[in-house]
Structure formats: C-alpha cells, structure tokens
C-alpha cells in the first residue's frame, strides 16, 4: 500500500512535466543536437544546394581554433567574466531595494510600478534599437550601447554654475551607473515584487508585536521568504548579462557566424561559452546557498507522511 | 514591559523617520522616473509633431503643430491594423499556453522530489541559457522539413517532411510544449514558488480525498495567482517585442516588431511620389514605436492592480 503511494506520486510528478518534456525531446534536444553537430563539422553554405557538411580532419578543430588560433575570443571571455562578477550583486541589491519601495503603500504607486516596467519593454526588441539610434543622432546618447540616457546636459549645467569639476564628474558617473542599472534590472524588480506579494501581512504584524525593528523584520521575515527568488534573479541576471547581445563575447560569436560565415566555429565558441557559464553559475549557486536559503535541498529529504 | 516602553519613546522618532522616508522616496522615484521616462517622452514628443517642427530649433519637447497624421500614416499605408491583430493573437495565445504548461512543469520540479528533479532543474537552466537567436538556424531547418523521427515520411511515403512554417498553430504548438520564448524563466519562477508552499496544505487536501490533479487544480492553482500574473505579463512582453522568433516562424504573417524593423524602407517606398523628407520618417517611426509600446503598457497598468489581490488570497489560505 505504501509502496504504491510512492509509485503513484512519482507517476503524477512525471505527468505534470509531460508536455514540457515532450517539447524538450521534440524541439530543444534537436536544436541542441544540431548546434553540437555544427561545432564538430565544417558547415558551408552555397546558393545551389543550400548547406553541406564536411567532416573535419580532427574532431576538435573548431574548438582548437576558438581557443588557440583566435586571439580575440579568449581575451573577450576573460574581460566579460570579470565585468559580470561585480555587476550581478549590484543589480540584485538594487532591484530588491526598488521592489521593496514599490511594494510600500503610497499615492501613485501604480504609476511608479509602470515607470519601472517601462525598461522591460523599451530594452527588448526593435524599439530599443530605434530609440538608441534616434537619441544618439540627437547627440545626447553615449558611446556605450547599453546606456540610453547620458547626463551630459546635467554635467554641462553644473559646470557652468561653477561646481568643482571632481564633484560634478563623480555625480555624473553615478547617474550614468544608476541609469545603466535601471535598464538591466526591470525583470528582477518584477520578480522580487512578486516574491514580496506572497508574504502575508500578518507576518509583519507579528514581528511588530514582538518588537522587531524594520531592519530586523527585513532579515527575519522578508529575506527568508524572498530568497528563492534571489536564485531566480541570480540565474536571470547572470544569463541575461552573459548572453545578451550587448555582451562583447556574444557580439563576437554572432560576428563570426554571420559576417565571416563561419557557422561551425561560432557554434564551437558558443557551446564552450555556455559550458563555462554553467560551471560558473553552478559554482556561484552552491557557494551562496551556504548563506542564502534558496530552498535547494541537496540530496533527498524524507517525504512528510 | 520593556518593549512597550521602548516603543513609546520611539513613537516621535518613528513618525519623524516615516516623514523623512516618504520625502526621500518621492525624490528617489522622481529621479529614477526621469531616467526611464526620458526616451519615452522623446518618443511621444516626436510622434505628435508635424514634420516641419523638426526644422524649428526653438522646439525641444512641446511641438507647435500638434498632429495625429503620423499615426494616420501608420494605419493607412503600413498595415498597422493587421500587424497589431497578428501580434495580439500570437502573444496572448502563446502567453496563456506558456503560463499553463510552465506552471505544471514548475509544479512537478518544485514539489515532486525525485532523483531526476535536479537534472530537470539543470535542463531548465540550459533552456534559458541558449538564446533563441542561436537556435534559429537549427529550428528553421527542423520546422521547414518536420519529420517526427522519420515517422511522417514513413506514413506519407514522400521524401520530405511537412513544412510547419508560416502558420499560427506552429507557434502555439511550440508554446504548448513549453518551448516558447524564455519558457525556462517561467518554469523557474513557478518552481521556486511551489517549493515555498507549505506541505501541510497539500497533505490536508490529500486527507480530504483529493487526488494529485485535484490538489493541483483546487489548491495550488488558486494560490498561484502572483507567479501566474508575473509569468503572463513577462511572456506578453517577450512575445510582443520579439523579432527573431517571429522572423523564423513567419514570412507572410507580419507582427509589429517585424513591421517596425522594416519601417524605414517601407516609408521610403510609400512616400516616393511625394516630396521626400527624412524628418517625416523620423516622426512616423517614433509614432510606430509609441503604438508598439502602448498596448502592453496599458495591459501592465491595468493588471498591476491585481498584484494586491493575490496577497489577500494567499494570506487567507496559507
């Protein structure tokens, strides 16, 4: 009787995942397979027969070329990894802060939420590229491709009023950093906001009655409930940063694929890049799970019966 | 006793602090709003001005010749209506399917612990990791000549599979199989949410005689308002703004972002006979951007009111 219950539970679990698993086998596995296959062959396009595969002399030729022959790829890889290392925690803290502010009760909250939702729409798709070129042609844009707003006007104004140079440049640097942050933390803010919404208000009432300060309530109530979503946002910001097309490594991979028409080499680069990202991600998740209760239980926990 | 005394002393400090905080919050939000709204206001200001206002250097934000001509051009010459209709049909349908399927997958990964669930979690991360642009070519080849492990060619007897491209059902099917745009993120959100639901809730339902599926539909789904809403909204944005996937799946069915990407050349052909003005193109282009963004922004502003409701529900049950 007991055995059959466990069995039933197992079957139910697989059934819930069934549509997605079918999709994984049917579509995802196939495109992953082709990606892997391209990386181990030489794929050439011509106008007559479409595309043809040619076997490589050595199976790992594409990978060798990516890391040994190509000088730009490994170099860009290292700079982009270093950059992400400090960007991720900053984005996470910033978006958690904004989410907490947006969850507070004040007039015009709906509008404020709308404002922080805008970057998600504006920064995805064709609209962003159009607005970027338009603002750059107005000579208000910056050289950086991720930054839409630049504080040039403000800087000039402050300098005219006779503020010390150093102070002005510090302020303008901070502003452009913040605006850069906003554009990449739209989705994390929304996810944190959702996590905050799942905390019953009674928890805070209890904390208040017990005499907890706001700071204590944050660490004892908010943080444990929100921590599973820190994992979601960690994965999102990490992948969004690494795989977005503003990333120098991704740009290079796409250049190799479409400008130089070396699809096989580009596949090899992309695959090794993904493997590196996954290794980093797993390491980061395991390391931080020592401090942050993500809800990952290593090994099987006993079923509660 | 000590606590009560402490709180009494703190009350003045408490209210003073609250006042200071709300002022600071206001300043902070206005500052942030300025950064975010800047490109949006630019867009709006361009969209409602007549092209001759572009020559006038005295006009920065508020145009002198207020006009809706730019929007009219979009509707009359650039098939904006049909593009809007296509985009709406595709993104609403796919987002709903994605929400339902990913909720189920997330429920399975988050609550049914087995040896495989760690592996499934890794697979989810893998699907997020590989961007759609990179699987474009493999997907295109796969769907243009769809052959389910050789079964279809075996049945029809012809040498090629079926061409599934350029039809609505294809993109719905992909979403229903949990392989839509960034479906991994949706699964991840649901997984983490369902992990947090207390075991007692499920056990109580089991004792009351609910099977696994009844427990899911009666207990879990009504509780999952917040993640469903977020997943729906995010999927809407991702489908609405997507360019690469739409270009892969469709050639004749044009969506908003596909239209928008080719708007410059389209406008040049439309206005060939009239006096060619580059400024006209700028204003119409910005009008198109506004129309592209507006529906999804309105959707968010109307749905964000529901963000409060879900807390009351989950508070009552959990």
Image (cartoon, coloured by chain):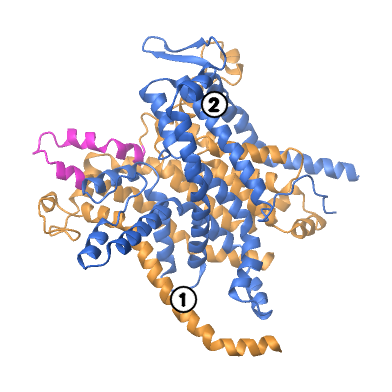
Chain colours: A blue, B orange
Provide the major secondary structure of the magenta segment: helix
Q: Is residue B219 above or below residue B31?
A: above
Discs 2, 1: same chain: no
Mark 1 belongs to which subunit? B
- In the foreground, B272 or B123: B123
At a point 49% along the width and 46% down the height, the residue shown is: B235
Q: Quadrant of the N terminus of chain B?
A: bottom right
Task: Check residue B270 for magenta coloring.
Answer: yes
Q: Which residues are magenta?
A: B255-283
Question: Circle 1 sits in a helix, a strand or a loop, which is it?
Answer: helix
Q: Which residue is mark 1?
A: B21
Q: What whole-number distance in Å separates the C-alpha atoms at marks 2 and 1?
A: 52 Å
Q: Is residue A213 left or right of residue B300?
A: right
Where is residue B205 shown, x and y percent of the image? 77, 57
- In the foreground, A51 or A252: A252
Front disc: 2 or 1? 1
Q: Quadrant of residue A171?
A: bottom left
Where is residue B317 shown, x and y percent of the image? 68, 65
At a point 27% along the width and 49% down the height, the residue shown is: A141
Q: Which residue is mark 2?
A: A31
Q: Is residue B228 above or below residue B242?
A: below
Where is residue A146 shown, x and y percent of the image? 37, 46
């Amino acid at each position: 009787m007991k055995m059959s219950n466990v069995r039933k539970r197992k079957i139910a679990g697989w059934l819930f995942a069934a549509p997605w698993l079918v999709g994984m086998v049917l579509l995802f596995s196939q495109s992953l397979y082709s990606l892997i296959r391209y990386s181990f062959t030489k794929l050439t396009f011509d106008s007559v027969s479409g595309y043809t595969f040619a076997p490589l002399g050595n199976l790992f030729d594409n990978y060798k070329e990516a890391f040994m022959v190509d000088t730009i790829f490994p170099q860009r890889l290292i700079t982009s990894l270093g950059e992400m290392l400090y960007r991720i925690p900053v984005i996470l803290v910033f978006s958690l802060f904004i989410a907490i502010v947006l969850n507070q009760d004040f007039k015009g909250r709906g509008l404020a939420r709308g404002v922080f939702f805008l970057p998600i729409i504006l920064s995805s798709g064709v609209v962003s590229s159009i607005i970027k070129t338009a603002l750059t042609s107005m000579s208000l844009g910056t050289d950086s491709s991720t930054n839409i707003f630049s504080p040039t006007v403000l800087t000039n104004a402050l300098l005219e009023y006779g503020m010390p140079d150093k102070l002005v440049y510090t302020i303008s640097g901070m502003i452009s950093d913040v605006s850069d942050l906003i554009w990449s933390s739209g989705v994390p803010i929304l996810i944190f906001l959702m996590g905050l919404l799942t905390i019953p208000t009674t928890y805070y009432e209890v904390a208040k009655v017990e005499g907890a300060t706001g700071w204590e309530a944050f660490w004892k109530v908010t943080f444990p409930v929100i921590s599973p979503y820190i994992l979601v946002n960690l994965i999102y910001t990490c992948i969004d940063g690494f795989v977005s097309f503003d990333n120098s490594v991704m740009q290079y991979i796409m250049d190799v694929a479409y400008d130089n028409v070396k699809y096989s080499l580009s596949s090899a680069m992309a695959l090794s890049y993904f493997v590196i990202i996954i290794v980093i991600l797993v390491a980061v998740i395991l390391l931080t799970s020592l401090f942050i209760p993500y809800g990952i239980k290593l090994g099987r926990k006993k079923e509660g019966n | 006793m000590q606590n009560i005394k402490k709180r009494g002393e703190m009350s003045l400090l408490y209210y003073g602090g609250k006042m200071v905080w709300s002022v600071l919050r206001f300043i902070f939000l206005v500052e942030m709003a300025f950064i975010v709204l800047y490109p949006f206001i630019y867009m709006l200001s361009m969209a409602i001005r007549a092209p001759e206002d572009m020559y006038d250097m005295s006009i920065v934000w508020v145009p002198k010749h207020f006009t809706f001509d730019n929007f009219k051009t979009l509707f009359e010459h650039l098939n904006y209506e049909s593009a809007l209709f296509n985009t709406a049909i595709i993104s609403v349908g796919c987002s709903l399917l994605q929400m339902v399927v990913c909720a189920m997958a997330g429920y399975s990964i988050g609550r049914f612990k087995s040896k495989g669930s760690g592996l499934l979690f890794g697979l989810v991360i893998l699907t997020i990791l590989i961007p759609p642009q990179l699987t474009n070519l493999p997907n295109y080849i796969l769907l243009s000549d769809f052959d389910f492990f050789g079964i279809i060619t075996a049945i029809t007897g012809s040498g090629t599979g079926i061409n599934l491209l350029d039809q609505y059902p294809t993109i719905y099917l992909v979403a229903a199989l949990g392989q839509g745009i960034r479906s991994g993120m949706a699964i991840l959100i649901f997984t983490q949410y369902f992990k947090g639901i207390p075991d007692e809730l499920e056990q109580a339902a089991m004792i009351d005689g609910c099977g696994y599926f009844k427990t899911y539909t009666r207990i879990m789904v009504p509780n999952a308002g917040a993640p469903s809403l977020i997943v729906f909204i995010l999927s809407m944005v991702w489908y609405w703004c997507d360019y690469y996937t739409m270009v892969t799946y469709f050639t004749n069915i044009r969506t908003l972002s596909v239209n928008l990407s080719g708007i410059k050349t389209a406008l040049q052909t439309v206005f060939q006979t009239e006096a060619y003005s580059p400024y006209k193109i700028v204003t119409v282009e910005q009008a198109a951007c506004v129309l592209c963004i507006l529906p999804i922004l309105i959707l968010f502003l109307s749905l964000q009111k529901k963000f409060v409701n879900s807390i009351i529900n989950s508070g009552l049950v959990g």
